[in-house]
Amino acid sequence: MSLTTTFIAELIRAANEMDKLSPFEIERLLNRSVATIREMREQTGVPGSSRAKDVVIFKAARADALAEEEIRDNLLDAADIIRTLKILLDGKD
């Protein structure tokens, strides 16, 4: 399993186990998501999007300011974006 696939699984697991995560862990996951998405977009040549779910993820660095449902949605949206970018990258090879 690749590191990207492992990270996607980690995001989904975190979204399903919100009650087991501290605000620090959530913030760390969201920040890693932002960094991963930016790096993968550079590799694929896919520019950032102004779509709502992209905007929410990039605003989500402060986990303590979001409701649990918003955090869950952000984690799942990040996993989805990373998965899509991974498919694009795998297709380039």
Image: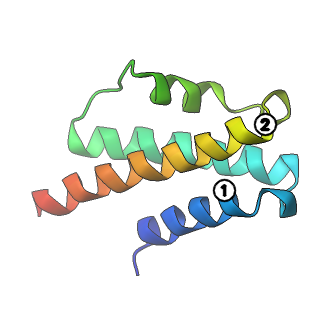
Q: Amino acid at mark 1?
A: Ala
User: Which residue: 78% across, 41% down?
Assistant: 68
> Mark 1 to mark 2: distance in Å?
13 Å
Residue designated by label 2:
63
Rendered position, 40 above or below 38:
below
The residue lying furthest to the top in this view is 50
**The C terminus is located in which quarter?**
bottom left
Tell me where residue 9 appears, x and y as whole percent. Answer: 53, 68
**The N terminus is located in which quarter?**
bottom left
Mark 2, secondary structure of its residue: helix
User: Which residue: 78% across, 36% down?
Assistant: 63
Q: Of 68 and 32, which appears nearest the observer?
A: 68
User: Pointer 2: residues within 10 angstroms few (<14), some, or many (20+)?
Assistant: many
Mark 1, secondary structure of its residue: helix
Left or right of residue 17: residue 30: left
Residue designated by label 1:
15
Tell me where residue 39 appears, x and y as whole percent. Answer: 40, 44
Q: Amino acid at mark 2?
A: Ala
Tell me where residue 37 appears, x and y as whole percent. Answer: 43, 43
Tell me where residue 45 appears, x and y as whole percent. Answer: 21, 36
